[in-house]
Amino acid sequence: MGTTSPFRISHGLGPDLHQVVKADQVWYEGAGRGASGAGQVGSPQLGVTERGDDGRTYMWVEASATIAVAASPGTQVTVTVTGPDNVTVAAGSGGWYAPNSGFYSGTIAAGDRFWVAKGTAP
């Protein structure tokens, strides 16, 4: 079995660093979240950070609006933290990037959860 890069070098579990979990799904936790985002507790929790083998820091977030997937380094996003386990992103600025088209080819919709990468290089 091949290795996909980037991959986490810290001890956390959960989706790959380039994977998008759709709004009606959840990682390792039963049937998933409802359309409103309510339901089962997911893993990891929003705001958790991981370190990738590429030297970059990644944060688990939820999209607050549709984000267009772009070529590397990806679409830059603005991170908004409004409380524990409430970390959302939307297209904007701030030095964090959504997965690029080399890793993810779908549309990132409001409610989807994924890792954003800090900066364009380690």
Image: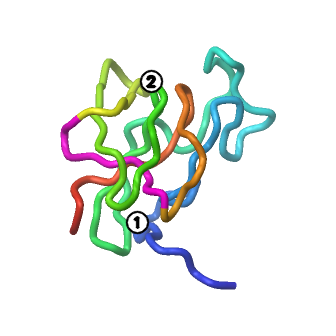
| Residue 17 screen position, x and y as percent | 48, 59
Q: Are marks 2 and 1 in contact (CB under 8 Å)?
A: no
How many other residues sit within 10 Å of disc 2, few (<14), some (14-19) or many (≥20)?
A: some
Image height of 97 relative to 77, above or below: below
Residue 14 seen in this snapshot: no
Q: Residue at x 33, y 33 (%)?
A: 91
**In the image, which residues are magenta?**
93-101
- The quadrant of the image that shows the C terminus is bottom left
Residue at far right of view = 31
Which type of secondary structure does the marked residue at label 1 adopt? loop
Residue 100 located within the stretch drawn in magenta = yes
Task: Name the residue: 37% across, 67% down.
Answer: 52
In percent of the image, x 57 and y 80: which residue is there? 3
Is residue 29 rendered magenta in the image? no
In the rendered image, which residue does mark 1 sit on?
Answer: 10
Residue 75 location (% of width, % of height): 35, 46
Quadrant in the rendering for residue 26: top right
Please tell me which residue is depicted at 33% across the width and 73% down the height of the picture.
54
**Residue where numbered disc 2 is placed:** 64
Amino acid type of the residue tagged 2 in the rendering: Ser
- Discs 2/1, front: 2
Give the left or right position of residue 66, taking residue 24 as reference: left
| Secondary structure mostly taken by the magenta-highlighted segment of the chain | loop
Give the Cα separation between the discs numbered 2 and 1: 27 Å
State which quarter of the image contains the N terminus: bottom right
